[in-house]
Image (cartoon, coloured by chain):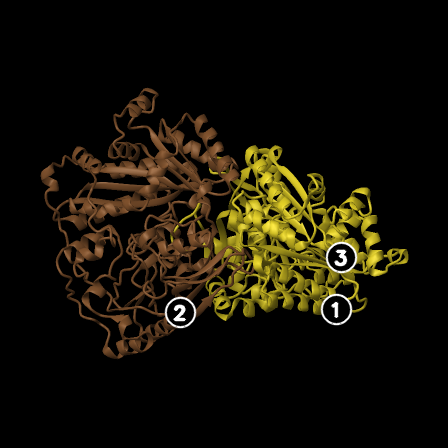
Chain colours: A brown, B yellow
């Protein structure tokens, strides 16, 4: 039985995963920590959840909700409300540790069908009650907070089933609240794969992927989620919008794409039809390379994407600092192989790792790998075989769960990401790194992990000791400077995390008054009383 | 100097292309025509253009337009107005032949810059004057008509230049009024290709491609135009919307995609940034196949698309009747090779041609061709080499120009197309064919020409003798039944021709009231006085 704040912010069953020795050694070296610093945990949030804000909607309305979904599917207890108050944004995790939940939802409701969702949206619209769709709450952008209270609509309990598989079309229609593993396991069992593997995969839902416009680690070959979704059913206050499924069309602009990135502000996505692909892991080819510097790795990657050789599905570069940390934490530093690499000119502090994997038919996968190897060789890389990529894949989800034990050690750790065109990539990388590095004792690891013909995503991970006693302000100021730097350097506000409330303040300046005005007009039409995920999400009123 | 109706409906410099003997023979056989029927042309439209409707906007406003663009860039003469009254919809061509132009624009304006466009949009909005953007007027959906008169804004005279090429990003920013050949020739000269080759290529513009959401003959590999465009600049009555260029992003839903398929109803697209690819024709691989029947060809095509073998860029199937006509018109019928094929079981009336070409790196193109050949072999096809595909490519644009000489012979000829999922393809093909064939003496040729993992496009071409004296009503009735049949069988209203006014009456029923309502709300916000391409385009008010 979950009862504490810690139960909320921890990730499911990976609850007390320890920090490995390699990482602890890096922390000692970089931050000057000693074993003493590791002897006790900092603000652990082990207190029982107790909310100060009472339920703000009246019994009459609760009764109406119960009439729709049944008594067992309306929760107003403190733990239910607290566990639906936040996603996984760093400052939210700090607040949970501190027991600060000033604005939880008033009730959590678990609908059993799209029809019930329609009744709930209608009821909330009639009474002006805020309604926030809730999936895996892996949002790192304050996307599921409830500043106006109201109802958190949790789709994961019941709306989590496959509706239809069409093997001829290679499509699947699925309820929005289905979690990644259940979805993928089912697809694998019938010979397909969804191809969408965000780091949050184990604790995120199909509906959340689309609502926040996510990208999986295989996006270079499979596309982002908005490239995979062919049709949606969305319950909006203005009515149900259900689009038809075509491979492509020219019947005006695409309505279903307006809900990609809508982040709950326009309505509740209840069903999604997405394309799926043959599951042929036996054909997958893996490779890894080490480059002498970041620039040559980036140049090789761009050449692969622009040379018409086919597409890797996984394609990553770790920048010099991330490569250095990987070598250290994986115990590769100073091994014979490491010394050999140094002698060959692949020096720590400038060398960069590249991982690649490619799915498809046997012949296709081999051909792509061969081409990638040829291009990388021309860029002065050293081929390091399949193993490093396979090892990286082993921990593809679990590295995210390290954040909690690191916070236990008093370490601030967060990530931010941006999409950039190729000609601006190194500039954004170095501007943002310089900013992050202006903070003393800060480890900054950067990778490129979603790649296109015309540009790529830059993903920044930083670790730095918390300013104890001033954790939230310290973080807020640092975060603001970081987003300012990305924005000023020409990166997008996000490539796949979404905007939520954490990036909302930059939206108008970034998109322009007229583009945001158009978004607001769409919101006003579909949600005239602004009940859907209100309180500034996406910079909307 | 152009002066007649015929000058308007004819396609540029291919003015009096004769119908080849092969086609004439087919016409004789199918329609029972004799040489007498070919001896004179029917309603040729060779009269001098003379409009009955006077210019409906006053001199004061014309003076304001002249103040913006200069006197040479505002035309009110009959020929200028008449030549901007229609696109290339069959019924429009009949009307031009008959000299029927009841609702031409009042003036044709040729802006020299996006800034001038902004002033014109503002002026028209202030005075409630209809404004219709005009590119290559190759619309086959009544997309550029001016039922409310007003101004036809022709972008092709001045707004036809490359603004910027970014070789690192593999992108190009181009003014909307640039024609296909000028665009592609320039790109080729610097080592790139646009990859977008609609049949209208020689007489259509980049802005028109995006506004009507077109697809080129190489779309299977390069994507539709909406998959290639990364950013736009659009002048709307509510202000200028200029989106930033990213390879992908998650900053709310994509604003620039709302203008894909907007068909001039939301604003004037002045600039487009699109991705381009390396121009490597020396690597292209070609193949063609003959299948015993349509079903096995479709099945092979689907397997290619769903097997992860890479993507052909050109991928087509001609159905049995189109294959039969191709054999006859190309003089292949009853040759030794033809007799051999018949003996092998590839019988006329059921056999189907498939064309394939694939661009990319040398290794990729070879690998894809090899895989396609293997899959086609398994489906009982006979490999017919590269030549038929190369021959087809030779006439890739010019077959469209046959329409005018056929109309000279009193033959109604038109095309309609739809997007379908794989599991519905044969059903839609046969339903629509049955409908079209219910008209006596009608040749119906169908091909699949834009292919996806999840479905494809079906393209219908029909020829039938005109009902002389009742050409327009006869066509209107036949066309209505055709669209009704597509709609009822589950096809999209369009895959790449767009909607215009010819398909607008089906939009509400097809998309649903709520989806069309959302489109109307977007229109109302950007164009509150409904001045942009008004009069029912896309089913909007």
Separation of disc 3 and disc 1 at Cα?
22 Å
Q: Residue at label 1?
A: B474
Of mark 3 and mark 1, the one earlier in the sequence is 3
Quadrant in which the N terminus of chain A appears: bottom left
What label sits on residue B5 in the rendered view? 3
At numbered mark 2, what does the secondary structure look like: helix, strand or loop? helix
Q: Position of residue A492 (x, y in %)?
A: 37, 46
Query: Does residue B241 appear in the picture of this structure?
Result: no
Query: Does residue A14 appear in the picture of this structure?
Result: yes
Location of residue A412 (image quadrant): top left
What label sits on residue A473 in the rendered view? none
Q: Chain of mark 2?
A: A
Q: Which residue is the extreme one toward the bottom?
A: A60
Q: Is residue B94 left or right of residue A342?
A: right
Q: Residue at label 2?
A: A114
- Determine contact: label 2, label 1, CB under 8 Å: no
Q: Which residue is the extreme one toward the top?
A: A343
At numbered mark 1, what does the secondary structure look like: helix, strand or loop? helix
Separation of disc 2 and disc 1 at Cα?
46 Å
Separation of disc 2 and disc 3 at Cα?
56 Å
Q: Chain of mark 3?
A: B
């Amino acid at each position: 039985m979950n009862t504490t704040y810690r139960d909320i912010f921890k990730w499911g069953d990976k609850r007390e995963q320890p920090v490995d020795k390699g990482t602890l050694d890096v922390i000692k070296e970089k931050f000057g920590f000693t074993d003493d610093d590791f002897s006790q945990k900092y603000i652990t949030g082990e207190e029982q959840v107790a909310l100060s804000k009472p339920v703000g909607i009246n019994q009459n309305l609760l009764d109406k909700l119960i009439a729709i979904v049944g008594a067992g599917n309306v929760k107003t207890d403190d733990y239910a409300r607290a566990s639906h108050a936040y996603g996984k944004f760093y400052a939210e995790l700090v607040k949970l540790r501190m027991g600060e939940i000033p604005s939880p939802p008033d009730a959590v409701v678990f609908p059993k069908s799209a029809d019930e969702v329609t009744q709930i949206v209608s009821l909330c619209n009639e009474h002006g009650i805020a309604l926030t769709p809730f999936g895996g709450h892996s949002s790192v952008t304050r996307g599921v907070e409830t500043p106006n209270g109201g109802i958190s609509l949790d789709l994961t309990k019941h709306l989590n089933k496959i509706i239809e598989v069409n093997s001829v079309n290679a499509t699947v229609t699925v309820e929005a609240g289905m979690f990644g593993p259940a979805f993928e396991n089912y697809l694998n069992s019938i010979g397909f794969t969804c191809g969408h593997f965000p780091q949050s995969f184990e604790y995120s839902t199909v509906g959340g992927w689309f609502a926040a416009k996510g990208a999986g680690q295989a996006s270079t070959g499979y596309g982002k989620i908005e490239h995979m979704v062919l049709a949606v059913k969305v319950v909006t206050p203005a009515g149900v919008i259900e689009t038809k499924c075509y491979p492509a069309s020219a019947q005006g602009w695409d309505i279903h794409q307006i809900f990609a990135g809508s982040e709950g502000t326009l309505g509740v996505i209840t069903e999604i039809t997405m394309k799926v692909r043959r599951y042929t892991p036996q054909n997958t080819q893996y490779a890894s390379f080490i480059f002498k510097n970041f620039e040559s790795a980036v140049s090789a990657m761009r050449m692969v994407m622009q040379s018409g050789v086919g597409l890797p599905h996984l394609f990553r570069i770790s920048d010099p600092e991330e490569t250095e940390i990987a070598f250290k934490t994986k115990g590769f530093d100073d091994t014979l192989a490491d010394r050999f690499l140094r002698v060959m000119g692949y020096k720590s502090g400038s060398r960069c790792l590249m991982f690649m994997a490619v799915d498809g038919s046997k012949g296709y996968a081999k051909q792509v790998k061969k081409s990638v190897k040829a291009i990388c060789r021309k860029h002065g890389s050293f081929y390091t075989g399949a193993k490093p990529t396979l090892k990286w894949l082993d921990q593809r989800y679990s590295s995210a769960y390290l954040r909690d034990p690191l916070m236990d050690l008093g370490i601030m750790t967060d990530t931010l990401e941006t999409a950039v065109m190729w000609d601006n990539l190194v500039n954004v990388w170095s501007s943002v790194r310089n900013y992050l590095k202006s903070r003393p004792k800060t480890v900054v690891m950067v990778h490129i992990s979603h790649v296109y013909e015309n540009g790529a995503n830059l993903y920044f991970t930083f670790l730095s000791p918390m300013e104890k006693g001033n954790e939230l302000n310290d973080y807020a100021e640092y975060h603001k400077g970081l987003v300012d730097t990305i924005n000023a350097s020409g990166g997008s506000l996000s490539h796949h995390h979404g905007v939520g409330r954490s990036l909302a303040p930059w939206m108008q300046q970034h998109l322009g008054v007229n583009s945001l005005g158009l978004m607001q007009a769409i919101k006003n039409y579909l949600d005239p009383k602004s009940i859907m995920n209100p309180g500034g999400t996406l910079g909307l009123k």
